[in-house]
């Protein structure tokens, strides 16, 4: 399973990239706003660090506007994937963008029917927002299971990016279900490395090593 980092903070991206486990980046308008930088600047900075798919979001709400934005955004770098919301105009736009060879990531996905439509219009990725579903008392990972089943049933190539995760357990569940990608905040990615028994064991080994005659 691929791991993407979900942020527009360049220092976090640089550090996570140095760990050797990051395959790509997802951003959204909230992340870009939090970076305090201009959209173009932040996306260019990310492209200079990460060699992998980088999602940058279009904000127009009509197909024509989304296509115009997508053409501009995709010119920034060959790794750009344009994020488009799963609204009717978004599907219309993605159908055309797919024909034009521009990769898309359909975002704000909350139902399996939306994910089916995303596959039909040839989106490269679909992003179910699991943690936000959990928040309203619906099991987010159940949506991922349904999408995996549908895509397997028909051999759709659209990749599932499990998004808006809230803890490392969501990463494990994504891998067990067979999601293609899991995108996560920097703090959750850091937690994937940790186990208290590893720390305790290492401390003991280092103490014992001191007793070895030198
Ligand atoms: C994914 O592409 C989104 O940027 C992200 O996962 C949203 O997550 P949030 O609910 O933590 O804002």
Image: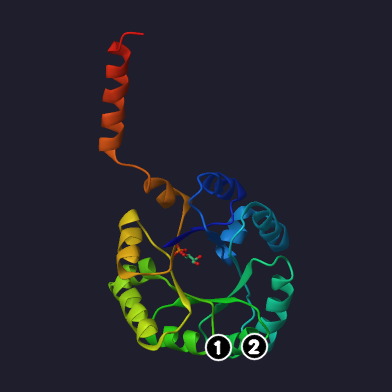
The quarter of the picture where the C terminus appears is top left
- Left or right: 135 with respect to 63? left
Relative image position of residue 173 (x, y in whole percent):
30, 63
Q: Residue at x 28, y 11 (%)?
A: 211
- Left or right: 81 with respect to 188? right
Residue 96 appears in view:
yes
Q: In the displayed orientation, state which residue is furthest to the front.
A: 214
Disc 1/disc 2 C-alpha distance (Å)? 13 Å
Relative image position of residue 62 (x, y in whole percent):
63, 87
Residue 173 versus residue 120 in the image, above or below:
above
The quarter of the picture where the N terminus appears is bottom left
Local packing at callout 1 (Cα closer than 10 Å; few below 14, some 14-19, many 20+) is many
Comes first in the chain, label 1 or label 2: 1
Relative image position of residue 189 (x, y in whole percent):
43, 51
Residue 115 versus residue 138 in the image, above or below:
below
Q: How is the image coloured?
A: rainbow
Residue 141, labelled with which disc?
none
- The one nearer the camera, 36 or 11, is 11
**Which quarter of the picture shows residue 121?**
bottom right
Helix, strand or loop at label 1? It is: helix
**Which quarter of the picture shows residue 184?**
bottom left
Q: Disc 1 vs disc 2: Cβ atoms closer than 8 Å?
A: no
Q: Which residue is mark 2?
A: 99
Q: Residue at x 58, y 51 (%)?
A: 9
**Which quarter of the picture shows residue 205?**
top left
Residue 138 versus residue 122 in the image, above or below:
above
How many dots with numbers? 2
Relative image position of residue 134 (x, y in whole percent):
31, 69
Q: Which residue is mark 1?
A: 91
- Eye-nearest disc, 1 or 2: 2
């Amino acid at each position: 399973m691929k791991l993407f980092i979900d942020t527009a903070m360049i220092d976090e991206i640089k550090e996570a990239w140095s760990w050797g486990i990051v395959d790509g980046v997802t951003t959204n308008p909230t992340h870009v706003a939090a970076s305090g930088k201009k959209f173009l600047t932040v996306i260019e900075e990310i492209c200079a660090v990460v060699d992998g798919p980088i999602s940058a979001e279009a904000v127009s709400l009509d197909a024509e506007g989304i296509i115009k934005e997508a053409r501009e955004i995709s010119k920034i770098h060959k790794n750009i994937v344009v994020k488009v919301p799963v609204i009717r105009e978004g599907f219309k736009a993605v159908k055309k963008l797919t024909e034009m060879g521009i990769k898309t990531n359909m975002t704000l996905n909350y139902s399996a029917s939306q994910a089916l439509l995303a596959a039909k219009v040839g989106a490269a990725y679909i992003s179910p927002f699991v943690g936000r579903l959990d928040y309203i008392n619906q099991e987010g990972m159940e949506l991922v299971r349904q999408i995996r089943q549908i895509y397997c049933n028909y051999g759709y190539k659209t990749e599932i990016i499990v998004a808006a995760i809230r803890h490392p357990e969501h990463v494990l569940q994504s891998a067990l279900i067979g999601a293609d990608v899991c995108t996560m905040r920097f703090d959750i990615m850091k937690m994937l490395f940790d186990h208290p028994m590893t720390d305790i064991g290492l401390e003991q080994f280092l103490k014992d090593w001191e007793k070895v005659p030198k």
